Each structure stands twice: as C-alpha cells, then as structure tokens.
Image (cartoon, rainbow, N blue to C red):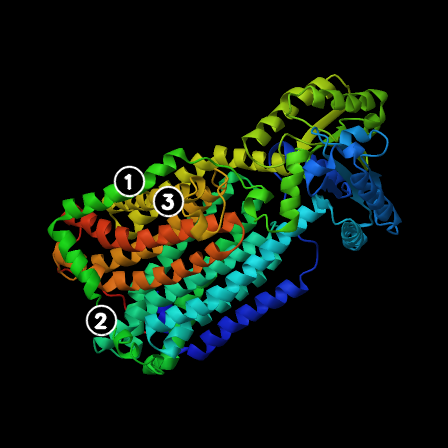
Amino acid sequence: MERVAGWSVRHRALAIVGWFALVVVAVLASAVMPGEMASSTDPGDSGRAGRVLDAQQKYPRPQENVLVQARTPDASGPFTRSPELRRATEDLVAALRRTPGAVTAVRSPLGRDGGRLVSKDGRSGLVTFEVAGPDERTSEHYDAATEAVKTVQARHPGVRLAQAGDRSLSSVVDEGIKGDFKRAEFFSLPLTVVILLVVFGSLIAAAIPLLLAATTVVGTFGFLQVLAHWVPVNSATSSMVLLIGVAVGVDYSLFYLRRAREERAAGHGVAEALRTTARTSGRVVVVSGLTVMLCLGGLLLTGLDNFKGLTTGAVLVVGVAMVGSVTVLPALLALLGHRVDKARIPWVGRRRTAADRSRVWAAVARAVVRRPLVWGGSAALALLLLALPALGMRLQDAAVTDSLSRSVPTVDAAARMQEAFPGAPAPASVVIWGARDPGAVDSPAVRKAVESLHGRAAASGGALNEPISTARVGRALVVRVPLASFGTDETANRALETLRKRTLPAALGGVAGIDYAVSGKTAFSYDFTQRVTDRTPYVFAFVLVLAFVLLVVAFRSPAVALVSIVLNLLSLGAAYGVLTWVFQDGHLSSALGFTSYGGVVGWLPLFMFVILFGLSMDYHIFVLSRIRERRHAGAEVREAVVGGVASGAGVVTSAAVIMTAAFSVFVVLSAIEYKMMGVGLAVAVLIDATLVRGVLLPAAITLLGRTAFPGLTPGARSPRPRRAGR
C-alpha cells in the first residue's frame, strides 16, 4: 500500500487523470456494448412455468378486472336485480368493446356463464378483459381501456368501478418504486453533504468523499451495464449500488483523511503523512474492502437470479471504491496538501480540522477497561434483550395491498376486489405444455381436464375460486385460477399448496403426454421464500467461516477473530429483534406510516446479514488496527484499548452517522419493504458503531489481555517498509 500511494503521490496528475479516464471508459463501454440484456429466471415451479413461456417467445396478454358494485350496498340489492348496476355494467362492456382494437375477451356478469362473475353475496359483479397486442402497443391499448373505465365511471356516480389486474398492479408498483427512489435521492444527497460539512469542517475536505463516491458509483454503473449482458440486473441492483457506493466511498475517505490529518498534526510533511496513512489506513481499507466483497459473494450461494445482479453490483462498487481510495485519493491529497483544510465552516471548522482524539469515547473506554465484565456484560445483555423478538420472526413477502397504502386507487380496488372475488386481482397461472408432443395440449382429454377445474374450484373448500379463464400462448395453454387470496399470507400459501398438490394432480395427473407448472405472484413469492430459507444456512456458514479466516490472516489472532464474529452476530440479532418488534408486531406504525401485515419480508434478514456483516467489518478492522498499532508501539493492553478507541471511534461514529442517515431516508418511502430495510440497516449500523465498537469491543480486548495479539512484544515495532524508490 505504501508503494502504491508513493507512486500516486509522485505521479499525481497521471493518477487523477487515469482515474477519471477509467470512469469515462466505463460509461462509454456501457453505451456502445451491443447485444440484449440477460433476463432472470424465477426459482422453483414458477421458474419452470416461466421458462416454458420464454420458449414460446410470447406471453399471455395482461388481464384486467373491473369491480362493479354500488357505493351504498344496502340500497342497491342483489347485483342481478339492480337496474343501476346492470346499466353501468352494460355501459362499461359497450365502452370497452368500442375501443379500437384495445381489448379482447371481454367477459360480463350479464353475459353467458355470467353467474361465475357475480360475487357469492350477490352484491358485486366483475367485468374482465385482456389488453390487446402487439407488445409495442400494449401501453397505448391499456391507457385507452383505462380511460374508457374512467369515462363510464363519470356517467354512473352511484356505482363504484374499481379496476385492478396484471397491468394496473404492475404499473402502480413500478411507479411507486420510481417515486420512492426519486424521494430517496432528493433527501439523501443534501443530508449527506450537510453531515460531511459538519464532520470535516471544511468545504474542500467534505468534497473529497463526495467526489470519490460519485465517480465510484458512475463508473460502477457503466461496468454493470456491460456485465448486464451476462448477469440479470434489476432496478433494486441500481439502488443498492448507489447506497453501498456512497457508504463505502465516504467510509474509506474518512479513514484516509483522518489519518493523514493526524500525521500532519504530528509534524510530518504531506508526502510522509500519506506514506504512513497508506501503510495503516490504506491497509485497513484493502482488508475491509476484500472482506466486504467476499462476504457479499455469499449471496450467490442462494442460486437466485435476483441476487446475482445485486451481488455483482455490490461487489463491483466496493472494489472500485477500494481501488480509488488507494490510488486517486492519495494523489488528490498530495495535490491539495495543506489546502485540504481550507474553506473552513464557521464555528465547527477549527475544531473539526484539528484531528483531536474523541474525549467522549476516551472517557467511555476508560470506564469500560476498568470494569470490562460489568460494562461488557451489561451491553451484551441489552443486545440479547433487543434480539428476543426475532425468535418469533415470520418471513412473509408483502402483497401489493400490504406494501402500498390504500390511498392509491389501484391498491384500494385490489383490496375491495379481494373481498368480493378472492384471488381475482392476481390469480395463479397454470402453464400446461406437451412434454414430448407439442400438440398434446389440444387433445380432448386436456380440454376436459381444464373444464373440470371449475367443479374442483367449487369443491376446494374456498381454496380456489371463480372466475377461471384460459388463454393459448404458442404451444402452451395458460389457465388462470384465482386462489383464496392473491397475496402472500398463510391463506394464499395454503391455497397454492392445494392447487399444486391436490387439485392439479387430480385433474391433469392422468392425462398422458403433458406437463404443467404453476406461476403467478403468490407462487413466485412462495418459491422465492422457500429457496431463501433452504439456502440461508449455507450463506451464513460461508460468511462466518470466511470472515474468521480473513480476520485471523489480518490480525494473526484466532481469539480476536472469534470475538469479532460474536460481536457482529450480537448487533445483527438486535437489529433483527427491533425489525420484528416494529414491523411484524406493529409498534410505531403510526409514527413510521405503515400498517403491519404480520410478517417480515422474506429476503431481508439474509440481505441484512450479508450487507451488515461486510460493512461492519470496516469499523471493526479500523478500531482494531488502531489498538494493535498502540500495542506495537509498546502500550499496555488497557492503554492501547483506550488510545485506539479514542482515535478510531470518532471516525467510526462520523461514518456511521452518514450511513445511518442514508439508510433512514428509506423510512420516508411509501413501500413497507423499503421502510423495513431502512429501519433494519439504520438500527444495525447505529448499534454497531456505538454499543459494539465503543463498549463491547474494548471490554472484550481488555478481557483477552495479552492473548488478543499473540506473538506481539510491546515496544518492538514491526520492520518499517522501505520507501518507494529507495
């Protein structure tokens, strides 16, 4: 690291220009790279269905549903005997059919077999239609159909026409995600800038982490667009790249700038200060960066395409930030020299640019090392108490009606439709295809078996519902079967299991030459959560063993490595407990603006484990390195702990404040999944940077005593690396 920094300092112009050239090349490469982007495949049975439809190179047309019911149900009477409801239904059907080629397969509760489109209580009707193709005109046709529904609604104010279906539910989710991330970007960037100004006390010094983070994220996006031709990348990947890129870019800059300031304050010149910084903080950045990258790689063990792009993007952005921090960052600091502390902020500038030790953390550390058992035991007990609610954590993804507020018209429509026609907003899709003969789906046996599903739905005890519809897609047949719930709760899962394990084998199991699989929103969530649950132990084992090995290599102390892992697990368990207590149990729902649906998003605990275990290593390795340096310099254990915490914990706190603020922005977003992620990550970082690094870590090192760093003789410094060029 010292040699790399020495080269950057001597060739600062080349290092800076080279870095920006790398970013430009990444952006240009993403723009000129030919070919199609890689697509993801769903896991389990829903993935099989998706692959069959992919092979047809066409997909079922989006189905939309319009709920027809009186705004005052008690006054309307049964649907079939209400003139007002009948007129509105006839008007709606006529308006839809008048749209020029926009819709097909219009079905009405007043038409043939219309009884299946009347609710069980007889008070609501359901009009269904498919949005016509071709694909390039689907959006135009959907808009025309939606406008027709709105026009009819205006003519019948006493009737509620509530639309929800494949396209409308997907659109509201997509629009919600886009709006959420625009709000996140709007809040997070100014907030990060303000905190950086307070932390550094200088406009120039605060601009350096922003520059590194911005170029890192832009360059990563460029490289990621190139890799997207082979690795499936979704919108969540871009958001995580931005979040992690800003976090590690700011962290690494803080570690570097703080140490450089300390060395200059000790009387060293800029070049000497940067060499020492590279040998100490530079090494910490590389070790922690590699640890984060390898820990993130554990997500690949899930085998889920959704995590492949996320893992690739996260590993790439950490790697780019790490390279930038040990190359262009020393060059920038060498170019600026003492001018890095110019343009000070009034009132806070002089104190912040002085690089003093933290008096607060020094006082805390002194108290801890005097009574390590009392302080460490109390802190550990507090974390264990916080973790207790996690024992009852129930993994369950949020349906659209759980995720978004009912103030959104489509969400309210889906909720009302679910009450009148369970499962109708997003039914399960049974894909049937010829196992050997593609024409097998046209056989009379298949038609008879599909028709029998109507009777089996009625006999399913409420697990399956009407209306069932079919659509031909290439050489496959898609049968839409509404489940007891279109969500992801226990009712929906039991209905899905009934369909897969009882109804379909009874109806289709005896038909020769065909195969089938079930997809849909409920099926995908069920299969995804099942895969995550099955693979989680492997991911945990991989990350824990890998972290242990890396820490042993970095500090040559199995005891320190083991203690580090235990401390990380304690902070993570506490974050899990808070997450469960808040969102699953519904506490603070009014303050945070959500309605509990009784579960925690299935992918979040695993995602939090990998992300936080990696990111917390930044803080952990930084503070441990400061303690180890003082032991090398001859300090006794307690003195080394106090000095290391006092000089390192302040930087860690500053970095944690920035990261916590970035994560907390997600709490103001609309989707409950992002609120969960924001609260979970923010709480974990806050606990990790305060209670764990400020109390538990010094208590543990004090109790370990001389065994913390075996083979280390106080006062005997490690051989100083030769300066580059000597």
Instruction: Find the distance from the CA under tag 2 to the CA under tag 3.
Output: 34 Å
152 and 473: which is toward the camera: 152
Name the residue tied to disc 1: 384
Which element carries disc 1, helix, strand or loop?
Answer: helix
- Quadrant of the frame with the N terminus: bottom left
Residue at 56% across, 52% down: 236
Q: Position of residue 480 (x, y in %)?
A: 73, 33
Judge the density around disc 1: few (<14), some (14-19), many (≥20) Cα neighbours within 10 Å: some
For marks 1 and 2 on the same chain, the one whose residue lies earlier in the sequence: 2
Amino acid on which the number 1 mark rests in the picture: Leu
Instruction: Find the distance from the CA under tag 1 to the CA under tag 2.
Output: 34 Å
Name the residue tied to disc 2: 356
Foreground label between 2 and 3? 3
670 and 69: which is toward the camera: 69
- Can see residue 710? no
The quadrant holding residue 618 is bottom left
Question: In the rendered structure, are the residues bearing label 3 and label 1 in contact, judged by CB atoms less than 8 Å apart?
Answer: no
Amino acid on which the number 3 mark rests in the picture: Val
